[in-house]
Amino acid sequence: MSNDTLFAEALTHFPGGVSSPVRAFRAVGGTPKFFRKASGAWFEDEDGQRFLDLCMSWGPLILGHAQPDILAAVNEAMHEGLTFGAPSRRELALARKIKAMVPFIEKMRFVSSGTEAVMSALRAARGFTGRDRILKFDGCYHGHSDGLLVKAGSGLVTFGAPTSAGVPKGIAELTSVVSLDDLETLERTFAELGSELAAAIIEPIPANNGLLLQRPEFLQRLRELCTKHGVILIFDEVISGFRVAPGGAAERLGITPDLATYGKIIGGGMPVGLYGGRKDIMGVVAPDGPVYQAGTLSGNPVAMAAGLATMERLTPAFYAGLEANAAKWAAAFETLPGLHCPRYGSLLWPLFQDGVRRSDAVKGEAISSFNRLHRALLGQDVYLPPSGYEVAFLSGAHGDAELDHFKQAVAAVAKAFA
Ligand code: PMP
């Protein structure tokens, strides 16, 4: 069946025809590609057309689609049972590996998604501090739990307002929201509310509203303010973790959070999330402490196997190669007239605008030009994330042949952007 036939049916089953909103292609126009199968940096859709993938399932596939070592590990694990709902040795192997790569993780808990990891880390922080209020930053995304679908409210002291229907006002009000790159408001918020805050959560490399790279002093000051006011600093490394360095953004920035959340890469393409950090804070989690958190499929053996097979291949040499390669892809993007491509590690943000550090600075024209680029490159068999606010992800499978294909595609569409 063709993409379009499948999508017509999908619309009868799912809101927007999809299982997660951005996939619906509403932002860029057209109809979504139905993935039939994928390998390395390429996928084939249900029309039988091959595309070079620069979205890569939004981050987990740092080694590429259907990487043979991961498939072998999954195959071995699955023949020993799909789920136990009981402890099994593969959780320990993955935990050991994570501790070796991220030294500040003293204790951790596996969950099944990034949303769950963040929700649970916040509950632990609240349980540990006995405080209810949290702080987040405009332009960062932390999953779809109630307290995080929140924007700045209108008052002087910012009590948040829901960004989604269905989020109770009373819950949103417990979240204060500060703009990225706004040191003054950050200082003021801590001065007024510091003693009420359980946690401050940030994507240290904000990559969900484009790539809003922060000045190091902003993150450093946030660390200092949290320490001064007894606020738990949570780095949400669901995207940056194990992508930008073995120890994620915390290692590259030289800033140690109290807790961190992970997802995507640690599951190697299977549903896994993780929260962890200081053992005194993690000590409040059940059954050791009074903060309840649980999961039927948490620590799932097949998912652990996929995660471990991935992590075992993430050597310093792998990161160095990926980084050097990513610089070439960013340069190739920038041959498009007017396009700038901020990059951090293997995260790239192609945008027709320069120097953006806050979400409110992104211009509407820059996004409409991206939408045009998305359609133009699809016509050249290149699949960008279907929204100008999303970053592109590279993998170890994006080699020289892929880069050549990409350069030719860019050259073919460049005229339309001159
Ligand atoms: N935090 C960050 C930084 C993310 O990028 C995401 C997902 N893109 C999440 C949390 C939520 O993760 P999930 O989609 O696995 O629930």
Image (cartoon, rainbow, N blue to C red):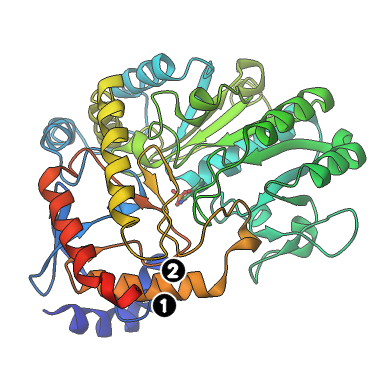
Residue 14 percent location from the top left of the image: 37, 75
Circle 1 or circle 2, nearest the eye? 1
Measure the C-alpha gap from mark 1 to mark 2: 8 Å
- Which label sits on residue 26? 1
Q: Is residue 81 left or right of residue 355?
A: left
Check contact, mark 1 vs mark 2: CB within 8 A.
Answer: yes
Q: Is the distance from the Cβ of mark 2 to the nearest ligand 1 atom less than 8 Å?
A: no
Residue 20 percent location from the top left of the image: 41, 65
Q: Which residue is found at the position 10% from the left and 48% from the top?
A: 401
Kind of residue indicated by mark 2: Pro
- Which label sits on residue 21? 2
Q: Which residue is found at the position 21% from the left and 65% from the top?
A: 411
Please name whichever residue, 328 or 110, is drawn nearer the observer in this view of the structure. Answer: 328
Please name whichever residue, 319 or 297, is drawn nearer the observer in this view of the structure. Answer: 319
Please name whichever residue, 15 or 309, is drawn nearer the observer in this view of the structure. Answer: 309
Kind of residue indicated by mark 1: Arg
Above or below, 286 against 17 in this view is above
Task: State which quadrant residue 168 falls in.
Answer: bottom right
Residue 395 percent location from the top left of the image: 25, 42
Q: Which residue is found at the position 89% from the left and 53% from the top?
A: 157
- Which label sits on residue 132? none
Above or below, 326 against 341 in this view is above
Above or below, 412 against 327 in this view is below
Q: Is there any visible trace of residue 164 in the rendered image? A: yes
Q: Is the distance from the Cβ of mark 1 to the nearest ligand 1 atom less than 8 Å?
A: no
Quarter of the image with the C terminus in it: bottom left
